[in-house]
Image (tube, rainbow, N blue to C red):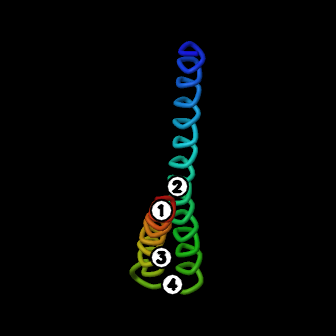
Amino acid sequence: MDQNQAEKEPKESSKRSLNALARYSGMAFQIAASIIICLFLGKWLDTKFPMKFPLFTTVLTLLGVFLGVYLVVRDLLKQK
């Protein structure tokens, strides 16, 4: 019986690490996607409403960063 348990532990451990890798990769993708979407939206708005300073790009990119971090923190707190 000890041999069966010893064989199961590495499989379960690798399965847990793969699940964690997938979860954290998804979170990184959420952050990147929110920043990129807000960045392109800001650039588009800056071409529609030209100003001396790229206000929309700056504000929306910062909003994308905060939104991405908020989504990740919410997911982390939900999983605990």
Q: Contact, CB < 8 Å: mark 3 with mark 4?
A: no
Secondary element under disc 4, as helix, strand or loop, is: loop
Secondary element under disc 2, as helix, strand or loop, is: helix
Instruction: Please give the residue where the numbered disc 2 appears in the rendered image.
Output: 27
The image quarter containing residue 30 is bottom right
Instruction: Please give the residue where the numbered disc 3 appears in the rendered image.
Output: 60
Residue 75: where, in percent of width, then height? 51, 63
Q: Determine which of the numbered discs, if any, sits on residue 72 in the image.
A: 1
Q: Nearer the viewer, mark 3 or mark 1?
A: 1
- Which residue is pictured at 53% across the width and 41% down the height? 21
Q: Earlier in the sequence, mark 4 or mark 2?
A: 2
| Amino acid type at image mark 3 | Leu
In this view of the protein, which residue sits in the foreground, 22 or 53? 22
Instruction: Please give the residue where the numbered disc 4 appears in the rendered image.
Output: 50
| Amino acid type at image mark 2 | Met
Q: Earlier in the sequence, mark 3 or mark 4?
A: 4
Q: Is residue 45 above or below residue 76?
A: below
Q: Nearer the viewer, mark 3 or mark 4?
A: 3
- Which residue is pictured at 52% across the width and 36% down the height? 17
In this view of the protein, which residue sits in the foreground, 36 or 13? 13
Q: Earlier in the sequence, mark 1 or mark 2?
A: 2
